[in-house]
Image (tube, helix red, strand yellow):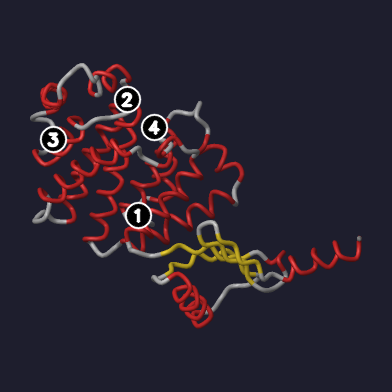
Amino acid sequence: MMAAVNRESYAAAADKLAAGSTSVTAAQLATIADEILAVARLLRGEPRLRRALTDPSRSADERAGLFQSLVSGKLSVITVDTLATLVAGRWSAPAELLDATERLGTDTVLTAADRDGKLADVEDELFRFGQVVSGNGRLAVTLSDPSASADQRAKLVEDLLKGKVQTATLQLVKIALEGFGGRSFESSLSKLVELTAAKRDRELAYVTAAKVLDDAEEQRLAAKLSDIYGRQVSLKVEVDPSIIGGLSVRVGSDLYDGTILRRLNEARQAFAK
């Protein structure tokens, strides 16, 4: 979670971007997202630059001017103005500037997908790919291996997903490969699913069922959870026959375990006493 001073700096840059991009197309906004994420990669590889751009001995104008001198003419005006505003803010540590730049790029990817009407698809595709990875140990190890070249891992993801998912989904998976917010690859994917759901103003519910739920069952469950949480709920359903029957539902830190497996385990424990 961002410190208060970092949140203020981030909000100023986000407002700058929102004001400057009201009339741009989804495709143009996606290009701006690419540019912001390219700067994030630059900051990740250049710790001296991160320190220079967050140096408290320099004024806000000096830091912004330094950034503008490096990128003006190479990036769009909207991107330069937005990130100059970000750099001019106050940051508790150089790494916080990197995290904020990455988060701003990610949010811009989501905003572009939303503007294009593809956000629900992106949310579902990210979740499904996360399931594929967690179910394939070799793939999980390969994509999470920090000793492997980032370019090689990105190429593998492209080979797996290009043409099969939304462009935004592929972009977000690549962000996860880089360790979004310092997380592991699989944890990054989960966080990005959560952010996508939040962008749609939905609560995220992870459901484990013994068999595939039909549309009517999903709708009833979603409606019941929506009544409980006071907002629409996006279901992410995983099938696991080992639970025998019933459902397990996790929403944030809340867990509702109505599985037959849980009841059997409780019965065993009761008989063992």
Q: Which residue is mark 3?
A: 80
What is the distance, in whole Å, between disc 1 and disc 2 at their CAs? Answer: 37 Å
- Establish if 149 lies above or below 133: above
Viewer-side label of 4, 1 = 4
- Upstream in sequence: badge 3 or badge 1: 3
Residue placed at 15% from the left, 32% from the top? Answer: 84
- Upstream in sequence: badge 2 or badge 3: 3
What is the distance, in whole Å, between disc 3 and disc 4 at their CAs? Answer: 26 Å
Viewer-side label of 2, 4 = 2
What is the distance, in whole Å, between disc 4 and disc 1 at their CAs? Answer: 19 Å
- Establish if 45 lies above or below 238: above
- The image shows residue 81 at horizontal and vertical percentages of 11, 37
Q: Nearer the viewer, residue 141 or 119?
A: 119
* Kind of residue at disc 1: Gly
Q: Quadrant of residue 75?
A: top left
Q: Which residue is mark 4?
A: 151
- The image shows residue 178 at horizontal and vertical percentages of 41, 35
